[in-house]
Amino acid sequence: MGSLDSYLPIFFMIVLGVAFAALSFGASKLLAPQRPTSAKEAPYECGIVPTHEPARRFPVRFYLIAMIFVVVDIEIIFLFPWAVDAQSLGRFGLVEILVFAVSVFVPFVYLIAKGALDWGPVKRVRPLESESVRTSSSTVRRIGPSSGEAA
Amino acid sequence: MEAEVQSAAELAGWTGPASTGAGGQEVLHVTRDRYLEVVGALRDNGFAMCSDLCAVDYLRHLERPLPEGVAPERFEIVVNLLSLERHQRIRVRVQVPEGDPVVPTLFNLYPGTENMEREAFDLFGVRFAGHPDHTRILMPEDWEGHPLRKDYSVGRVPVQFKEAPGPR
Amino acid sequence: MGLEDLKHNFLTGSLEELVKWARRSSVWPATFGLACCAIEMMSAGAADFDLARFGMEVFRPSPRQADLMIVAGRVSQKMAPVLRQVYDQMVEPKWVISMGVCASTGGMFNNYAIVQGVDQIVPVDVYAPGCPPNPQTLIHAILTLHEKIRLGELTKRRPGVTGAGIDLAAEPAPVGWVAPPSGAVRLGTPR
Amino acid sequence: MTDEELTAETSEGPQELQERDQTTPVELGIEEGSSLRLPEALLGDHGDIDVEFGADETMIINMGPQHPSTHGVLRIMLELEGETVLRSKPVIGYLHTGMEKTGEQLTYVQGATNVTRMDYLSPLHNELVFSLAVEALLGIDIPPRATWIRMLMAELNRISSHTMWMATNGLDLASSSMMIYGFREREMVLSFLEKTTGLRMNHDYIRPGGVAADLPDGWEDDVMAIVETIPGRVDEYDELLTGQPIFKERTEGVGLISPELATALSVTGPILRASGVEWDLRRAMPYLAYDEVDFDVIVGTVGDTYDRYAVRINEIRESCRIVRQCVEKMPPGDYRAQDKKVTPPPRARIDESMEALIHHFKIFTRGFEVPPGEVYTAIESPRGELGCYLVADGSNKPYRMHIRAPSFANLQALPPLLRGGLIADAVAIISSVDPVLGEVDR
């Protein structure tokens, strides 16, 4: 039984998690009034009943962002087991995880270089690159009563 | 600032009737056919901004103070122009008969008047020929009638008080 | 099949109290600011009058996460169907505070453009007078609503035993005040 | 209620933005032009937005009447390609209260109560423009103290309106602490307004013929307390927002408008000044006693959202300067015209003289008659040129009362500003235009 009890905390964590989820769902199912209506199922568009249903075709950039996220997410999942016993793996473990991290980071840098992430506004005008430090008083000019045209 | 402020009438080359409203403001009474031409001339002479365009329904006040030579009609379009350099305001008033309430649009001279003309159409029913988007703006789309006309009832809901002894 | 369908008895009594206490102390308002009353509603939400003391510190914009709709301002004919749509999309249990005289009875604008009283569109629980009601009045209205939730009953009562407050099955009719015209009709624009 | 009826309830048909294939080429041309609603003559830079999109590649979505960041019941229909806004069209009218029709039913004395509910962030400015119009028609002039009280209250109202804008603008750009600070300052100004006029908003304090009541005694130290703390607090906002990289990233270069485009779209107020046009009615066409007070007109250089923020934050400081001078130069004397026909007699005299009672009764029931005529007066409200076109037919009710709302014209500048930006920029731009829907829909 020796090795088993080291898994006890994980077991309690799972039980607690499931219990909490079940409690909240059960309570809301039990206590909340259930009155589904068609309006509640309809999409919420700021109070307007949408005449045409939302576009099916989303631009490809959304999927690109999702894929990049998945890659980096998986990398984190691999870090978990390594982190659990990083001490015992020692220097060899460190080098190994660094190699893995670099191998994921290089494509990420390539993606950024290719401009996959910055699909910002096309018409963003970058004024006055030189004077980049604009403060609220530097970007305005003041017209006093004297210099203004006397009406 | 130039020395004397030319009266807007000469600027626009308008020789027809002109008057001065309260507060000493200059008003041109333009006929419908020369309306675009006068406003265009004013625009080229420094009246860069059209600050306001509104309609007035003179159904119950036909005999209003008008300079001679202007036939009072039921509707009237009032355009307020503003010159930023000369700090000068001018009002152009156009008589619009009830029979065919149509006025050419100012959209190509002052794009700012697009919504103002839609509001004038929506609340008064005066049509603007050549307007790019001639729909209602304030009232719901399927609303009948033009609310700000004088013959349109206020739509008051009679207020019933429990003890009030009925309309006296 | 929830708690509402059980018959009221000693067992559900304390659970009912717990649920009512939970509901009334975290009523989240939907931001339904229309006109001047909305500014007073925001002032009530800000630091000086602080609605957070009553568990309402966050104004949920989407009706899915809101329990209370504060109709703050005058409701125009064009806005009426939108208001009804947002009310329909709110999830039960939901309450309505009609803030200000314009929302309650059309106020000083007795004309073609304003719906003379929002209770023609949605069932209203609490009417807050004032034009605009200052934040204290709004907080008083909110406390009245809390009182109403506390007195209301959750489980079904035997017919005839009518506890004060709302019976969730029917449209909630306010207590004591003149009941608004029941069966709030879906208001299209008048022909 | 079938789905079609349900949809018909909230759809406004041709008022809405139509699909690409249903829009006529002329309309599409206007909308596709670098700035919406502009004829070819005024087209600015086209921007490198490729314009040919298939019918189903773009999505038309409602940033609708009930939306946290549209500052009231403004509904903007956006045509999006992913996150980029291509075309947009504001649909307004969701707060149309028929105030101009109600204005024709109320007498001149009651008119201020109706007008003050239009722009509910600066109600005193509405009353001021209405009273100036009525006085211009009547031809009466009001005592100097009334003029200076009006100027003092109008500038305090400008401070409360701009701090309210700072609050909601901060909240829109995700700095909720700005919301709390902004409302804290506003409460200070509102408590003084409540002390003087009796109400926090919709005061009906500035009436034709002067003001409703004299300033409460000890008002100097209340106002000085406000005017001493607010500039210090505004410097705090400056520190909080101006240098912050996130705020600069969200506002610099976003929503650019050129001076010619702004003038052509009859945009006025901080937006016009931010784009570089020196036009402030308080300086150009002074009303009340603005020519005896020295203050600076703040003019921007670039014309983007950051400039509008800078213009408004500095205008709060200028308003504090004006209020300080109003406190120093406040003349003594009576606070409303002594013309029996226009202003009621002081309350105390009613008990003594029968004639005063008759005048008091007549003014508050029938009001006074204004000789026939028409006038257009305009003042500088926190949002721009607020004008009142009044037509009088000799009776005691205005024949036609049209209010030129600055936000109504400023909203037209939205489509050109939104074009090409992200939805997040749309939120920043709408908040920088600072529309108040009460005065847009009237």
Image: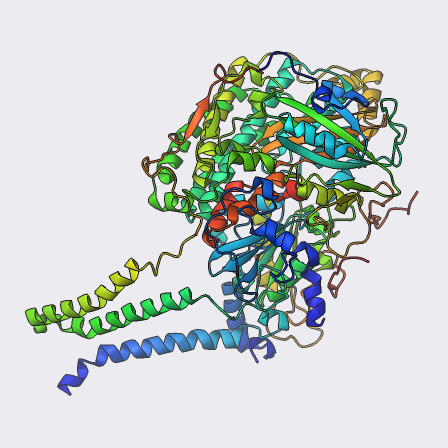
Q: Nearer the viewer, residue A1 or D54?
A: D54
Q: Is residue D170 left or right of residue C75?
A: left
Q: Does residue C75 appear anywhere in the picture?
A: yes
- Estimate the x, y position of residue B124 in percent, counting from the top left: 79, 43
- Estimate the x, y position of residue B79 in percent, counting from the top left: 72, 32
- Estimate the x, y position of residue B96 in percent, counting from the top left: 83, 37
Task: Give the residue furthest to the left.
Answer: A91
- Against D66, residue D54 (above or below) is below
Q: Nearer the viewer, residue C104 or B67?
A: B67
- Quarter-of-image position of residue A53: bottom right
Instruction: Name the image quarter holding the C terminus of chain C.
Output: bottom right
- Quarter-of-image position of residue D269: top right
- Quarter-of-image position of residue C179: bottom right
Q: Does residue D126 appear anywhere in the picture?
A: no
Type of colouring? rainbow
Residue depicted at x 57% and y 43%: C39
- Estimate the x, y position of residue D138 in percent, counting from the top left: 77, 20
Residue depicted at x 39% and y 33%: A136
Residue depicted at x 77% and y 22%: D137
Q: Is residue D321 left or right of residue C103?
A: left
Q: Nearer the viewer, residue B63 or D301?
A: D301
Instruction: Name the image quarter holding the N terminus of chain C.
Output: bottom right
Task: Give the residue furthest to the bottom.
Answer: A1
Residue depicted at x 75% and y 64%: C185
